[in-house]
Amino acid sequence: MIRMTTRLALVLVTALTMGCSAAPAAPAGRVGTARTPVPGTADAPPGEPRTLVENLAVPWGIAFLPGGDALVTERDTARLLRVTPAGKSTEVEKISGVRPDGEGGLLGVAVSPTFSKDHFVFLYFTSARDNRIVRYRYDRGLTDATVILGGIPKGVIHNGGRLAFGPDGYLYATTGETGDDFLAQSLDSLAGKILRMTVDGAPAPGNPFRNVIWSYGHRNVQGLAWDPSGRLYATEFGSNTFDEINLIRKGRNYGWPEVEGVGDDSRFTNPVVTWSTSEASPSGVAYADGSLWVAALRGRRLWQVPVAADGTVGTPVPRFTGRYGRLRAIATAPGGSLWIGTSNKDGRGSPRPGDDRILTLTP
């Protein structure tokens, strides 16, 4: 059961739609810890999207190589693709050991910030026994597969899976609580956490618990992005009521399952933005041109969330609502454009001719 405060319950104003329970929902794009929306700076709409690649199958992660090509994962086929800025797509490899099941499969991808020297590429995937992070050396193909972190709990749902290098040079990974809510609160489990590690999978220096855990109390974090000042933001699926963007700080507890959305318990850190689950199901997130850009699955839109220089989060603005269906993957290309992957073949969408696809736009 989800526990909410009386004050939180007062903001529940509409019933959820689209086949979920009839629990009430939050006002659209509500700024989480401020009780009234902060004026945003998202007045100018982004450029018009164009299709870069068609006929993919659930593109889940996007990460860029130094030359501008992107590595793209497909969750259910376990294929790793290489996509050029001109839209040419080739298969690098079908990844051995991946066991797709429900929300599990081939998920996140990250490219070493020192790729020109080490040629390291990292993949997060579901195996027969666990979720794991595997390091490869990528030249003309993938070699030297090394499991740098295994034993991450797996489930049919809530596998997390995002990988990204932070401005500190360390690898961050997100995990889900696999439907076992209280794993999120246990520091003895890797489930329901954001992890921070070296390229060898060791705890990064300065981690708060002398292990790879950076923050905890998460339900299912799906996206990571840093602003120019190095602040880390994460998107997180709620249950029946609130989806979230959280400002992630070292060692903080983000409350799941004790709190969904904004609460009044000082033990837990509140989100900076909440949405009703019908508006969002926020997956990937990227930072570009003064905003966070959030790909929404159930919400079938791209959310633009302005972020001021001091970290103040403005009022979210929906873009392209319903035009492309479910949106999951998003990344900022080296030149500043956004690459966005649809997810209409994931069993919960309605595929259209050409789906799934990667779109590109100038923010």
Image: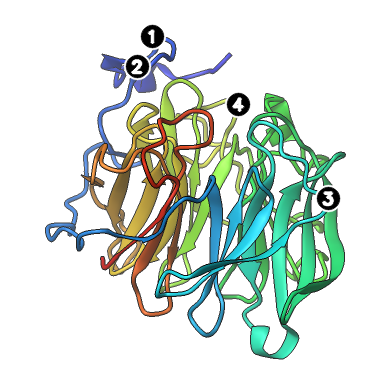
For label 2, the crowd category at 10 Å Cα-Cα, with few meaning under 14, some 14 to 19 and many 20 or more, is some
N-terminal of the two: label 2 or label 1?
Answer: 2
N-terminal of the two: label 1 or label 3?
Answer: 1
Please determine whether, in this image, residue 225 is positioned above or below residue 138: above
Kind of residue at badge 1: Ala
N-terminal of the two: label 3 or label 4?
Answer: 3
Whether residues under marks 3 and 4 lie with C-beta atoms below 8 angstroms apart, the answer is no
Measured from the top left, where is residue 192 in percent x and y? 67, 39
Kind of residue at badge 2: Leu
- Work out whether residue 272 can be spotted: no
User: Which labelled disc corresponds to residue 16?
Assistant: 2
Q: CA distance from mark 1 to mark 3?
A: 40 Å
- Viewer-nearest residue: 212 or 221: 221
The residue identified by callout 1 is 22
Camera-near label (4 vs 1) is: 1
The residue identified by callout 3 is 97
